Image: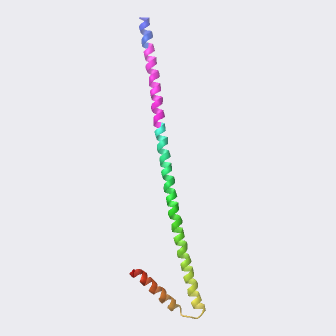
């Protein structure tokens, strides 16, 4: 009878150890998957940020070019006014350019 109890105790202990090992392995697998997903998401975010930064640089360059063109146009108008010429001639020329752009 005592031997039977020892056998049951041994089986219970072995089953308990196996459950603990199985639980630890499952925990490690879940942790590995979570870390892998977070790493992939972080990489995707980095790529998206780089793409967005490139787009913003291009847009900034376009805006700077537009500002430069407007400043040049203002200087040209100011030169016409300072020279005593009619700025309307320059305006008409700019208006014609704008109409040609709209037609095309």
- The region drawn magenta spans 9-30
Q: What is the x, y in percent for residue 93?
A: 48, 88
**Farthest residue, direction front:** 104
Q: How are the residues colored?
A: rainbow
Q: Is residue 32 above or below residue 77?
A: above
In-image side of 76 versus 31 (left or right): right
Secondary structure mostly seen in magenta is helix
* Picture residue at 52% right of the left edge, 71% below the top: 62
- The quarter of the picture where residue 69 lies is bottom right
**Farthest residue, direction left:** 103
- The quarter of the picture where residue 2 lies is top left
Q: What is the x, y in percent for residue 13?
A: 46, 17
- Name the foreground residue: 86 vs 98: 98
Q: Is residue 61 above or below residue 103?
A: above
**Farthest residue, direction top:** 1
* Picture residue at 54% right of the left edge, 74% below the top: 65
In-image side of 7 versus 75 (left or right): left
Magenta stretch holds residue 7: no
- Name the foreground residue: 104 vs 41: 104
Q: How many marks?
A: 0
* Picture residue at 43% right of the left edge, 9% below the top: 5
Which quadrant does the C terminus fall into? Answer: bottom left
Q: What is the x, y in percent for residue 28?
A: 48, 33
Which quadrant does the N terminus fall into? Answer: top left
Q: Is residue 21 above or below residue 54?
A: above
* Picture residue at 47% right of the left edge, 30% below the top: 25
Q: What is the x, y in percent for residue 71?
A: 57, 80
- The quarter of the picture where residue 77 lies is bottom right
């Amino acid at each position: 009878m005592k031997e039977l109890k020892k056998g049951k105790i041994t089986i219970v202990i072995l089953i308990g150890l196996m459950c603990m090992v199985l639980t630890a392995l499952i925990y490690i697998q879940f942790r590995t998957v979570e870390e892998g997903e977070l790493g992939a998401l972080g990489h995707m975010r980095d790529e998206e940020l780089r793409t967005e930064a490139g787009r913003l640089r291009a847009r900034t360059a376009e805006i700077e070019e537009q500002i430069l063109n407007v400043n040049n146009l203002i200087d040209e108008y100011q030169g016409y006014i300072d020279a005593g010429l009619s700025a309307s001639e320059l305006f008409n020329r700019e208006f014609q350019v704008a109409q040609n752009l709209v037609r095309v």
